[in-house]
Amino acid sequence: GAEQMLALRATIDATGLGKAAFAHSSADVYHEQDAIMLGYTVRSLSSMMAAVLVMVLLLTANFPMVFVMALCLYSCCTHMFGWMALTGTNLNALSLIPLLLSVGLCMDYCTHIAHAFWSSARGGSSQRSAAALYARGTAVANAGISTGLSQLPIVFSRSSVFTTFFWMMCGMVLVGLFHALLVLPVCLSLLPHAADSDEECEPLASLPSLPVPAAEPASLVGKPTDDN
């Protein structure tokens, strides 16, 4: 594997022969890929997460929302690595592409719920979280289920390309829906209520009320004047 290839090259370099001796194998093209895959994956995921979060910030101008989305992305990527270990999917060029796609898909699911939460105008964190889930939960669930059903035709394939893509897409949908419909609403409901104060949710209530003129006594209404 890649470890043996790197160890052999280190041994040859330690002999001091320079370019006079080298190791080569027809399988080195695959071992080279495995040797750089982990570092390349970390750099690619970091770049994609940064790009997505910058776009969310530009479109929403909401720093608390961006912070929550960053935590969601980090958790989704961690769960995707756990899903790969659970299904026995190796990290390679076939699984890397769906893994990078999961950043956008998980962000899509979670952003709908988070945007509905911060768009809610009344109530505390628990009420706003429930309202966001009620307003967008069905649409997000339908999107995830339809995406999962679209992958069913390739489950019967014998090609490792299609089977790897199937398992990664299934993990992507499950992890995304798990965070959007369960983890994120629970975390949002635990936010402090200082951001949901009555002054912020109902600004009109803090305005001073105008004095109301006193009503004329009923006994004076209709009383004849001296002129009459």
Image (cartoon, rainbow, N blue to C red):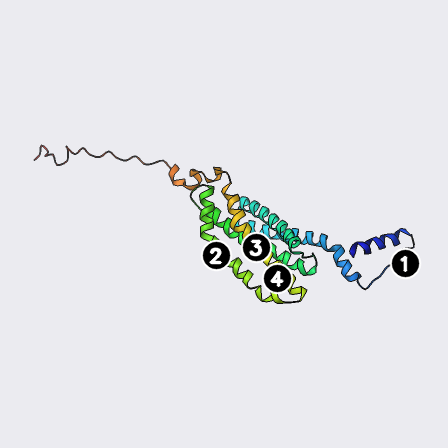
Between marks 2 and 4 in the image, the one whose residue lies nearer the viewer: 4
Tell me which numbered mark, 3 or 1, is placed earlier along the sequence: 1
Tell me which numbered mark, 1 or 2, is placed earlier along the sequence: 1
Q: Is residue 201 left or right of residue 15?
A: left
Dot 3: what SS?
helix
Residue shown at 42% from the left, 38% from the top: 198
Q: Which mark is residue 21?
A: 1
Could you tell me the amino acid type at mark 3?
A: Leu
Q: Is residue 135 left or right of residue 71?
A: left
Dot 2: what SS?
helix
Tell me which numbered mark, 1 or 4, is placed earlier along the sequence: 1
Q: Which mark is residue 139?
A: 2
Question: What residue does disc 3 label?
Answer: 174
Question: What residue does disc 4 label?
Answer: 166
Which residue occupies the foreground of this view, 123 or 56? 123
Measured as percent of width and height from the top left, residue 6 is found at: 81, 54
Distance from Cα at disc 2 to Cα at disc 4:
23 Å
Which residue occupies the foreground of this view, 12 or 117? 12
Could you tell me the amino acid type at mark 2?
A: Ala
Q: Quadrant of residue 20?
A: bottom right
Tell me which numbered mark, 2 or 3, is placed earlier along the sequence: 2
Could you tell me the amino acid type at mark 1?
A: Ala
